[in-house]
Image (spheres, rainbow, N blue to C red):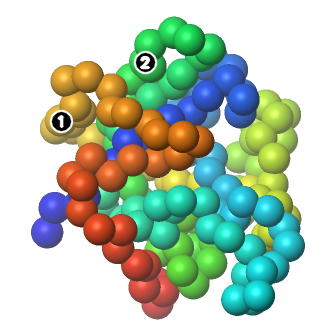
Amino acid sequence: MAGHKWAYRCTVAGVPLAQTRDMLAEHSFCWRSVFTKAQATTTGSPPFIPHVRGIHVDDSLHIYFAANSAPDVLLGSFLVKRPAVVATADTAALGRVLEPELETALFEIGYPHDPHLKVFTGFYLKPDLYPMPPATPPAFKGRNAIVNLEGAKNRTSEPVA
């Protein structure tokens, strides 16, 4: 079954374009925290980053970079791989970084740990051999970095066995 299509927007608020491109090329990895903050809410966990739980293994992820007021630049189209260890039971495709080389690279570039989990998290990727990115970059509304390109409802993730 074909996965869903998503757009992910990296910005200069994270790390510069060159380092973002290098992370994709050298490690096939896209950093993404799970939670917006460290403190738990009344439900027992901190708020999730919008749409992060909707991305599943084998979904398409079209990664863009935005710098100031310049137009978004497509960095590439990828398929999401199954991580060795999921970040949380609610995020089937978002993994915890276990590889020392990748941890070091993320630290040296300046990526932060997830504020609640206190570890590096993100998407493990492989190139999409048949990419179909939108003809024009999607509208990233507000501070949302993830956009569902199919307009479908956000899926909930099931724990990976």
Q: Amino acid at mark 1?
A: Met
The three-letter amino acid code for the residue at tag 2 is Val
Please tell me which residue lies in front, 25 or 157: 157
In the rendered view, tell whether residue 151 sits above or below residue 91.
above
Q: Which residue is mark 1?
A: 132
In-image side of 138 versus 18 (left or right): left
Neighbourhood count class around disc 2 (C-alpha, 10 Å): few under 14, some 14–19, many 20 upward: some
Image coordinates of residue 92 in percent, x first then y, are 47, 74
Q: Name which residue lies at 21% across and 52% down.
A: 150
Q: Is residue 104 visible from the viewing direction of this image?
A: no
Q: Which mark is residue 97?
A: none
Can residue 37 be seen in this snapshot?
A: yes
Which corner quadrant of the image does residue 94 belong to?
bottom right
**Residue 133: percent from the left, percent from the top?**
24, 33
- Residue 73 in the figure: left or right of residue 149: right
Residue 28 spot, x, y in % from top left: 50, 41
What x and y, as percent, mark residue 144? 53, 46
Which mark is first along the chain, 2 or 1?
Answer: 2
Q: Residue at x 56, y 11 (%)?
A: 69
Q: Quadrant of the N terminus?
A: bottom left
Q: Are marks 1 and 2 in contact (CB under 8 Å)?
A: no
Residue that numbered label 2 is attached to: 73
Q: Residue at x 62, y 14 (%)?
A: 68
- Residue at the (56%, 33%) spot, across then down: 10
Question: Disc 1 to disc 2, how far (Cα)?
Answer: 15 Å
User: Looking at this view, is 102 or 111 the one in front?
Assistant: 111
Front one among 40 and 93: 40
Please rate how many residues cluster around mark 1, counting C-alpha atoms within 10 Å: few if below 14, some from 14 to 19, many from 20: few
Identity of the residue furthest to the top in this view: 70
**Secondary element at tag 2:** strand
